[in-house]
Amino acid sequence: MAEKLKFSLVSPERELVARDVDQVVVPGADGDFEVFAKHAPMMSTMLPGIVVVKDGTSEDRIFVRGGFADVTPEGLTVLAEQAILVEDLKGDLLGEQKNAANNDLQAAQTPEENLAAQRAIEVLGRL
Amino acid sequence: MANLNELKLRIRSVKSTQKITKAKQMVAAAKLRKAEEAATMARPYAERMEAVLANLASGVGDLSNAPKLLAGTGSDKVNLLIVATADRGLCGAFNTNIVRKAREAIVRLQGEGKEVKIICIGKKGRDQLKRLYGELIIKTVELSEVKKVGFANAKEIADDVLARFEAGEFDIAHLFFGKFKNVLTQVPTEIQVIPAKAPENAELPDLAGAIYEYEPDEEEILKTLLPRYVAVQMFRALLENAASEQAASMTAMDNATRNAGDMIDDLTLQFNRARQAKITTELIEIIAGAESV
């Protein structure tokens, strides 16, 4: 059994996840990357996307709207602007997020904002 | 006798006031629990954010290339004071304490010949500052319509502040709020939000010789992180304020209830004495009447 990664995912309103897992996929600004235990320290901004948390056979998927991922020797911390479990993301909540993403696209002023909004729409469209 | 009736009325009115203060106290106690919970839940994010910022700031050796939000505009002429108070009264000296702290800062800054601008969050603070510094208030935010303060509320305020900073309306921003220490103590606190100050006591992770990598690069991360840091501090201040307000309200109402109780005791004693005196007088009159026959 490989060493476990200490993972925590926090949004401004609460701490969503704080436990030891095998592996986490993070939607980084320069592409998705996977973090295992003993990853080299790094910090990355995130685009809207899905954080996939794998532990043994279980897999949790969490939708995040931008934020940061901070990998330190102690573990991985994801600071998400907004985070919602994918299984909760349906019906009204999904529509709300889609609207928000569309609004972001309208309001986008820089290419980065534009890209982030398009990513959000694309990711939400796939759900 | 009129005096007796008057006393009776007063006792009744104090009793109904006591009922109101008691109810308000219980409401505040219930709300306090929720507000405290919200403040606690928000803590991990704020703490991690601080750690990340401290980490980044320590990596930026040369401040002259850093974003303005971290390095400042190079001037300290125009100061913006963001004064967060409650929208409602009935919470003792809570609002007054925050306003007093802000007023001291205004006097100090103006004494140094600096320009002061004020943004008020909460009605009570505005009401108290309006009298002396009405022309300095550039904006008031009222949150009385908001039931539960969410991050979106804080972000809205922060975005406005940041837009004003970008437009060069001020150089330094201070934030005033009531820090929630415990139910009995709320400390009026001042923090500087712009330019952002990384907490000095934050512990940096031990990298064991490894080099931190930044993706896309340090500057890009700082550029997105700093505005968010401002919003997070605003959010934290709002939550602490909400908890403090309820705690102060609870204490104030507890005192009021107790005072009302004391007053009822006093009045009842007075009432009984007056009644006894009346009975005695009547008896003496009857006896005196009987004797003279």
Image (spheres, helix red, strand yellow):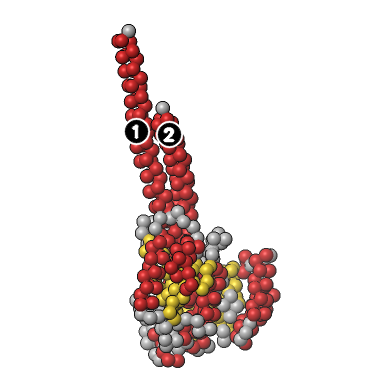
Q: Which residue is mark 1?
A: B269
Parent chain of label 1: B
The amino acid type of the residue labelled 1 equals Leu
Q: Is residue B65 rendered to the left or right of residue B269?
A: right
Of residue A90 and residue B275, the one placed in the foreground of this image is B275
Q: Which residue is mark 2?
A: B6
Of residue B69 and residue B266, the one placed in the foreground of this image is B266
From the top left corner, tell me how far across and down residue B120 is, in percent: 49, 68
- Count of marks, rendered view: 2
The image quarter containing residue B70 is bottom left
Respond whether the residues carrying marks 1 and 2 are from the same subunit. yes
**Dot 1 crowding, Cα within 10 Å, few <14, some 14–19, many 20+:** few
Indicate which disc, 1 or 2, sits on the residue closer to the N terminus. 2
The amino acid type of the residue labelled 2 equals Glu
Asked whether residue A1 appears in the rendered view, the answer is: no
**Dots 1, 2 in contact, CB < 8 A:** no
Of the 4 image quadrants, the one containing the N terminus of chain B is top left
From the top left corner, tell me how far across and down residue B262 is, in percent: 35, 41
**Dot 2 crowding, Cα within 10 Å, few <14, some 14–19, many 20+:** few
| In this view, B193 is above or below B262 | below
Residue occupying image coordinates x 38% and y 48%:
B255
Of the 4 image quadrants, the one containing the C terminus of chain B is top left
